[in-house]
Amino acid sequence: MSKPKFEEGTWVKEKTGTKGMTVVSNVVDGSSSEYAGNVLCKFKNAEGEEVEETFKEEDLVLLD
């Protein structure tokens, strides 16, 4: 896979969503140690709790 599109700390959202998230890290394949095309993001859920979830890089867009 190519280089990650987003750096740690970048502000992103899902292309189809409205929720802003912060990139925590780019997920690396455990067996090959190469970038896997997934991004771990941190956001607050409906209850206001911080949650981390993995998203496909292609499903995310940069927020300004």
Image: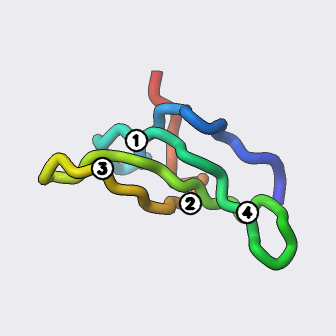
Residue at the spot of label 3: 50
Q: Amino acid at mark 2?
A: Lys
- Asked if labels 4 and 1 touch by Cβ distance under 8 angstroms, the answer is no
Residue at x-position 82% and y-position 78%? 31
Residue 24: x and y in percent read: 54, 46
10 Å crowding of disc 4: few (<14), some (14-19), many (20+): some
- Compared across the picture, whether 33 is left or right of 51 comes to right
Question: In what quadrant of the picture does the N terminus appear?
Answer: bottom right
The residue most toward the bottom is 31
10 Å crowding of disc 2: few (<14), some (14-19), many (20+): some
Residue at x-position 53% and y-position 43%? 23
The residue most toward the right is 32
Per the model, the C-alpha gap separating discs 3 and 2 is 20 Å
- Asked if labels 2 and 4 touch by Cβ distance under 8 angstroms, the answer is no
Q: Amino acid at mark 4?
A: Val
SS at badge 2 = strand
Residue at x-position 27% and y-position 46%? 44
- Asked if labels 4 and 3 touch by Cβ distance under 8 angstroms, the answer is no
Q: Amino acid at mark 1?
A: Met
Residue at the spot of label 4: 28
Task: Tell me which label, 1 or 4, sits earlier in the chain.
Answer: 1
Answer with the quarter of the image where residue 7 lies.
top right
Task: Tell me which label, 3 or 2, sits earlier in the chain.
Answer: 3
- Asked if labels 2 and 3 touch by Cβ distance under 8 angstroms, the answer is no
Residue at the spot of label 2: 56
Residue at the spot of label 1: 21
Per the model, the C-alpha gap separating discs 1 and 4 is 19 Å
